[in-house]
C-alpha cells in the first residue's frame, strides 16, 4: 500500500500553514496547495489519501474541485472546510458525494479525527480493488473500459501488459474513443501511480509560451518572467506525462522534445543548467502520424522514438455489439451524477442507440446518456414509449373484458374467438385483474337495470 497522504487546499496562507503543522504533528503526511490548479494531477484510482479543501477560493472553488475529483474516482474522500455561512452549501455537497465537512473555527483534533476515518475508508477501498484484481475479478480497467467484444478484451490485455512497464507509449484512436482514459489507466497500474499524472494538450498551448509551459523558466528569461517557474515536464518528475494530440506539436519544438526523450534532461529557459527528468511519456494522436511524417509535418525520428509501444483504441463502429451495454452503463453513471434514481432504458431506445452511428464515439454516447437521464432527448422517447405501452395494455384489457362479458364468462369461446391459447388467456386475465364471475355478474346486473 502506498504511503497515505493529505492534500490540503486553502488560499489563506496562515491557516494553511498552521493546519498543515498540526496535522503533521498528528503523524500525517501533508502536501499543501494555495489553489486547486495542480491537485487533480495527483488524483487517480491508486491515490492513497484524502483531500481537504476550503469551499471559498479564487479560481476553482472547493465544490468544483470535489466534482472534478469524483469524475476521476468517486471514492476519493473529500473533506470540505466551510465558513459559518457555507453550512447549507456543505450539506448540499454531502448529498453530492463529499465525505464530510468541518466548520470554521475547528480544532486540529476534530479535523484529525475526521481524516483518520476517511483514511481508513480509502485504505479499505484500495485493498478491495487490489484483492479483486488478484482474484481475477472485474477490475478497474474493465470498469473504465467496458466491453465484451474481442477487440476490447485485447485492448485491456495490452493496457495491463504495457502499463505495468515503464515504456514510452503511443495511443492512437479517433476523437472521443477514450485515449486519455487508456493513458490514465496505464499510469494507475504502473509503479508511478502515486506520482503526478500531467496531461498536456499540445493543440491548446499558446505558441509564444509553449517552451516556458513545458520546460519552465528562470527569472528574467523573457519580459514578464519576474520569478522562476517549474515547467510541466519538471512538475511531473517521478510520474507520467501525457502529450495529448502530439501531432499538433509545432515542428520546431519537436526537435527539442526528441532530445528530452533521448536524454531525459531539460533546461529551463534562461538557464544553462540541466535538470534530470524521471518521467514516463504517453502520447496520443487522432491522426495517422506516418502520414504526417510523409507530409513533412512530423519528425520521423520522433515518431520512431515515441513508438516503443503502440495501443490502438477502437472506435464504436469497430465494436457495435458493445454499444447497448455501454449506453446503459453510462445512463447509470449519469443518473448517479445527477442525483436521480436508476432509470430503465426502454427496448426501443436501446435498439435506436445500437443502430445509430456515433462519429464522436464514447464522448458522444456519454452526452446522449446525459440527455436521456435529464429528459432532454432519449428521456422524452422513454415517456412516449411508456405512454404507448400503457395505451396498448389498456386496449388489450378492454378487448378481453368485452369478450368475457359477451360469452358470460365462458372461457373456451373467449380464447377461441381471440385466437389465443387457454394458458395465454389465463395469464392475461391475471395480469389485468379480470375475474370471469365478477364480469358475468356485472353484466347480469346491467341487464336487470336496463329492464
Image: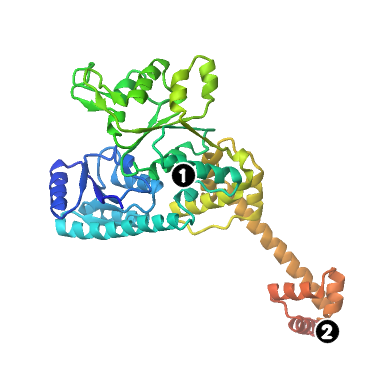
> Which image quadrant for residue 88?
bottom left
Please determine whether, in this image, residue 383 is positioned above or below residue 448. Answer: above
**Location of residue 117 in the rendering, given as x and y in whole percent from the top left corner:** 26, 61
Q: Is residue 282 left or right of residue 413?
A: left
Please determine whether, in this image, residue 403 is positioned above or below residue 327. Answer: below
Location of the C terminus by quadrant is bottom right
Q: Which residue in the structure is indicated by mark 1? A: 160
Q: Identify the residue shown where x is 53% and y is 26%.
A: 287
How is the structure coloured here?
A: rainbow
**Location of residue 224 in the rendering, given as x and y in whole percent from the top left corner:** 22, 19
Q: Is residue 107 visible?
A: no
Question: Between disc 2 and disc 1, whose residue precedes?
Answer: 1
Q: Is residue 449 left or right of residue 154?
A: right
**Location of residue 73 in the rendering, given as x and y in whole percent from the top left corner:** 39, 49
Q: Identify the residue shown where x is 31% and y is 39%.
A: 196
Judge by depth and name the residue closer to the eye, 68 or 392.
68
The disc at residue 419 is none
Q: Helix, strand or loop at disc 1?
A: helix
Q: Which residue in the structure is indicated by mark 2? A: 451
Q: Is residue 410 visible?
A: yes
Q: Badges 2 and 1: C-beta atoms under 8 Å apart?
A: no
Q: Helix, strand or loop at disc 2?
A: loop
The span from disc 2 to disc 1 (Cα, nearest Å) is: 83 Å
Amino acid at each position: 500500500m502506498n504511503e497515505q497522504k493529505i492534500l490540503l487546499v486553502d488560499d489563506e496562507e496562515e491557516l494553511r500553514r498552521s493546519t498543515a503543522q498540526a496535522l503533521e504533528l498528528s503523524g500525517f503526511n501533508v502536501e499543501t496547495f494555495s489553489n486547486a490548479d495542480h491537485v487533480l494531477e495527483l488524483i487517480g484510482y491508486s491515490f492513497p489519501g484524502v483531500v481537504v479543501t476550503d469551499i471559498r477560493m479564487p479560481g476553482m472553488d472547493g465544490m468544483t474541485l470535489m466534482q472534478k475529483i469524483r469524475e476521476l474516482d468517486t471514492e476519493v474522500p473529500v473533506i470540505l472546510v466551510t465558513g459559518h455561512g457555507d453550512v447549507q452549501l456543505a450539506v448540499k455537497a454531502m448529498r453530492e458525494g463529499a465525505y464530510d465537512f468541518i466548520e470554521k473555527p475547528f480544532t486540529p483534533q476534530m479535523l484529525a479525527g475526521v481524516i483518520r476515518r476517511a483514511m481508513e475508508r480509502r485504505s479499505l477501498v484500495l485493498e478491495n480493488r487490489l484483492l479483486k484484481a488478484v482474484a481475477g475479478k472485474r477490475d478497474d480497467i474493465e470498469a473504465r473500459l467496458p466491453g465484451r467484444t474481442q477487440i476490447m478484451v485485447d485492448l485491456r490485455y495490452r493496457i495491463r501488459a504495457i502499463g505495468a512497464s515503464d515504456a514510452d507509449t503511443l495511443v492512437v484512436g479517433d476523437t472521443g474513443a477514450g485515449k486519455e482514459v487508456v493513458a490514465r489507466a496505464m499510469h494507475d497500474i504502473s509503479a508511478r501511480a502515486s506520482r503526478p499524472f500531467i496531461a498536456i494538450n499540445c493543440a491548446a498551448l499558446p505558441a509564444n509560451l509553449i517552451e516556458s509551459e513545458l520546460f519552465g523558466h528562470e527569472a528574467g528569461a523573457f519580459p514578464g518572467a519576474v520569478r522562476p517557474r517549474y515547467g510541466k515536464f519538471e512538475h511531473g518528475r517521478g510520474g507520467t506525462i501525457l502529450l495529448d494530440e502530439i501531432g499538433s506539436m509545432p515542428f520546431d519544438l519537436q526537435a527539442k522534445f526528441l532530445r528530452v526523450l533521448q536524454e531525459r534532461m531539460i533546461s529551463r529557459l534562461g538557464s544553462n543548467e540541466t535538470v534530470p527528468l524521471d518521467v514516463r511519456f504517453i502520447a496520443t494522436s487522432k491522426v495517422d502520424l506516418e502520414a504526417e511524417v510523409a507530409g513533412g509535418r512530423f519528425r520521423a525520428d520522433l515518431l520512431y522514438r515515441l513508438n516503443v509501444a503502440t495501443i490502438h483504441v477502437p472506435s464504436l463502429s469497430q465494436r457495435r455489439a458493445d454499444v447497448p451495454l455501454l449506453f446503459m452503463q453510462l445512463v447509470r453513471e449519469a443518473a448517479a451524477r445527477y442525483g436521480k434514481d436508476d432509470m430503465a432504458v426502454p427496448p426501443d431506445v436501446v435498439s435506436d442507440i445500437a443502430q445509430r452511428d456515433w462519429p464522436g464515439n464514447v464522448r458522444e454516447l456519454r452526452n446522449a446518456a446525459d440527455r436521456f437521464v435529464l429528459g432532454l432527448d432519449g428521456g422524452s422517447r422513454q415517456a412516449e414509449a411508456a405512454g404507448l405501452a400503457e395505451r396498448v395494455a389498456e386496449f388489450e384489457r378492454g378487448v378481453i373484458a368485452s369478450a368475457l362479458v359477451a360469452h358470460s364468462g365462458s372461457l373456451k369461446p373467449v380464447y377461441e374467438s381471440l385466437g389465443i391459447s387457454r394458458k395465454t388467456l389465463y395469464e392475461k386475465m391475471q395480469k389485468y385483474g379480470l375475474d370471469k364471475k365478477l364480469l358475468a355478474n356485472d353484466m347480469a346486473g346491467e341487464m336487470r337495470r336496463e329492464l
